[in-house]
Amino acid sequence: MNSIDLEFILVLLIFISFLLILISKTGYKKDGVILNWLTYQAKSFLPILLIVLLLRSFLAEPFRIPSGSMLPTLLIGDYILVNKFTYGIRLPVTKTKIFEISSPKRGDVVVFRYPGNEEINFIKRIIGLPGDSISYKNKTIFVNNFEHKKILTVEHDYLSEFSRPEIDIFLENNTKKIYSTLNDNMSPPNDEKFIVPEGKYFVMGDNRDHSSDSRYWGFVPEKNLVGKAFLIWLSFDSNKFSIKLDRVGDSIN
């Protein structure tokens, strides 16, 4: 998910608005018509800019799902909301955490700034917490030697969007929650073991054989977490140019 630094733009516009209002208070009259017009606009939009900044920085932020790495949990064209305060309050732009609220849990679906390029946002599922030992054997996850049991299923409301003879859909149980995953039985298993460092997280896409994740580029630093995905607020089918109304309002498991 490509990221435009809207927070920086909002902060810049707020700063310019404050500056214009302050200049107008000094009685500076050069190019008065233009300055008056700009000041009027600044006073009109400043409350809106402040509200948008507060909502986006501290409450919730929208994102669009552009790829299939989180199939079948999230479909291409889903528009989601991310809870920005679940893991703590961070300042806009600097991303400095000023207030701790809770820590990520295994199974959370999270948006984060990709460690290889922090201008890009990724969305994956947290598999390992700091200190965990993660093994991926024959396409099965083991966390601290405990197996995430999988049950083969064929149930999904949008199975036709990713159903192919080589694709298997599973219900995976990490003892705290059950969620759907995909495996491509044409892809070879990549048995590996990882130890999650302190202050970092191990993440994977639910589309296990078609996801760029911690198996390939490493761990997600805590400071890179944007928030927890919790709601699908819109889902658009670009092929049929239609909205999947029955997905609107679905929570993200």
Image (cartoon, rainbow, N blue to C red):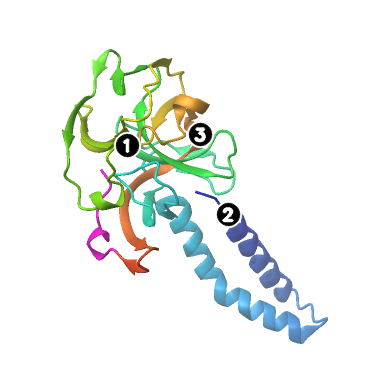
In the depicted structure, whether residue 4 falls above or below residue 174: below
Q: Amino acid at mark 2?
A: Ile
Residue 179's spot in the image, x, y percent?
Answer: 23, 37
Which residue is more in the foreground, 209 or 30? 209
User: Which range of residues does the magenta coloring cover?
Assistant: 244-253
Q: Which residue is mark 2?
A: 4
CA distance separating discs 3 and 2: 19 Å
The disc, 3 or 2, on the residue closer to the chain's N-terminal end is: 2
CA distance separating discs 2 and 1: 24 Å
CA distance separating discs 1 and 3: 16 Å
Q: Amino acid at mark 3?
A: Lys
The disc, 1 or 3, on the residue closer to the chain's N-terminal end is: 1
Q: Residues within 10 Å of mark 3 (few under 14, many from 20)?
A: some
Q: Residue at x 39, y 45 (%)?
A: 68
Residue 101's spot in the image, x, y percent?
Answer: 36, 37
Quarter of the image with the C terminus is top left
Q: Which residue is mark 1?
A: 108
Q: Which residue is mark 3?
A: 223
> Is residue 229 toward the left or the right of residue 176 in the image?
right
How many numbered discs? Answer: 3
Which residue is more in the foreground, 64 or 16? 64
Q: Residue at x 40, y 41 (%)?
A: 69
Instruction: Determine the image quadrant of residue 171.
Output: top left
State yes or no: residue 170 in magenta.
no
Local SS, label 2:
loop
Residue farthest toward the right in the current orientation of the protein: 30
In the depicted structure, whether residue 47 falls above or below residue 121: below
Say whether residue 118 is visible.
yes
Which tag is nearer the camera, tag 3 or tag 2? Answer: 2
> Is residue 240 toward the left or the right of residue 98 in the image?
left
Q: Amino acid at mark 1?
A: Asp
